[in-house]
Image (tube, rainbow, N blue to C red):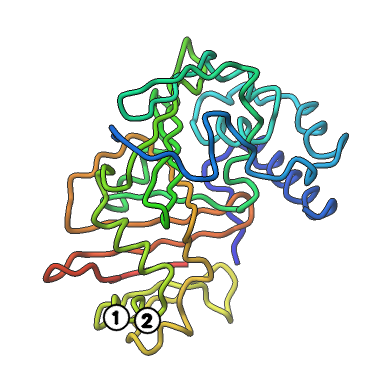
Amino acid sequence: MKLNFGKLSATSAGLLVGLLVLSCLVGTGCTDRKTPPSETVEETDSLPADSLPTDTVEDILEDTPLPKAVDEFFDDFFFNFAGNRNMQFSRIQFPLPVRDGDQTTMLERRQWQYSHFFMSDGYYTLLLDDEQQDSLSKVSSLTHAVVEKLYMHENLVKQYVFDQVEGEWKLTSIVHCELADHPCASFLHFYENFASDTAFQAKSLNDLVLMTVPDSDEDFTDVTGSIMPEQWPTFKPEIIPEGIIYCVNYGQAYTDESQKVLVVRGVANGLSVSMTFRLKNGQWKLVKFST
């Protein structure tokens, strides 16, 4: 599979490759909500505390100088934010507002625990109305972005809200809400079933599904064609995220209620998947995908 660092700078890409290699070596718009059952107000790390040995990954990342342009693009900032403990603590506006419906709790610095977010998963997602919205991630003038942690089985959303403050990206608040309050609630409820139920998945394919996949015989060449539902098990993407999913919003507005594009983007591992769904006769159908 082709290696693709996405939109990261060379420095950030190298930093991420180092993180992944070292990890292998050491083995390792919402208004209301219900707190996920496993979480309290205090933040928790996405990796167990003992999964990162002392003087290994964290120390090396913290000793790596940050790229001068780390704040130019949100992606560059966030990968460093998730991979560097010192930077993470310095880029959170404490006390941090945590909104829970009508209640707001102020999270103090001592309550925050370093989080790797989706780094251990090796990928994150984008939810778009169309493929053109993907260009928003390349806009250097972006001043607001949200990293959503979707608890698909619990129908809950946790939003990490980031803003540019005096030229630097900062985490400025956290918002909890119900999945039903998400602007893409209808699609997300469908997708939760699509990702977790193979029988439902087969029923949710268009009569012909357009696909673009790497040519197994030619490097750096893609093959485009179409498949019928019975061929799906052979050609379907290697990863169809389910359960807890991280989704990055670069400010894209969700105005098209009849189409959604779910992009799965790898963290320095070459993974790239795009799935296009359209609403047909009241039912969501997968009409196109690429890997």
Q: Position of residue 4 (x, y in %)?
A: 58, 54
**Separation (CA) of disc 1 from disc 2:** 7 Å
Looking at the image, residue 50 sits to the left or right of residue 99; the answer is right
Residue pushed farthest right?
55
Q: Position of residue 23 (x, y in %)?
A: 77, 50
Q: Position of residue 181 (x, y in %)?
A: 26, 42
In this rendering, the count of numbered labels is 2
Question: According to the image, label 2 marks what residue?
Answer: 199
> Could you say whether the residue bearing mark 1 is in a helix, strand or loop?
helix
Disc 1 and disc 2 in contact, CB within 8 angstroms: yes
Residue depicted at 78% across the width and 46% down the height: 51
Image height check: is 145 above or below 286? Answer: above
Q: Amino acid at mark 2?
A: Ala
Looking at the image, residue 238 sits to the left or right of residue 188; the answer is right
> Could you say whether the residue bearing mark 2 is in a helix, strand or loop?
helix
Residue pushed farthest left?
281
Question: According to the image, label 1 marks what residue?
Answer: 203
Closer to the camera in the image, 131 or 29: 29
Residue depicted at 28% across the width and 32% down the height: 31
Q: Amino acid at mark 1?
A: Lys
Looking at the image, residue 76 sits to the left or right of residue 205; the answer is right
Residue pushed farthest top?
166
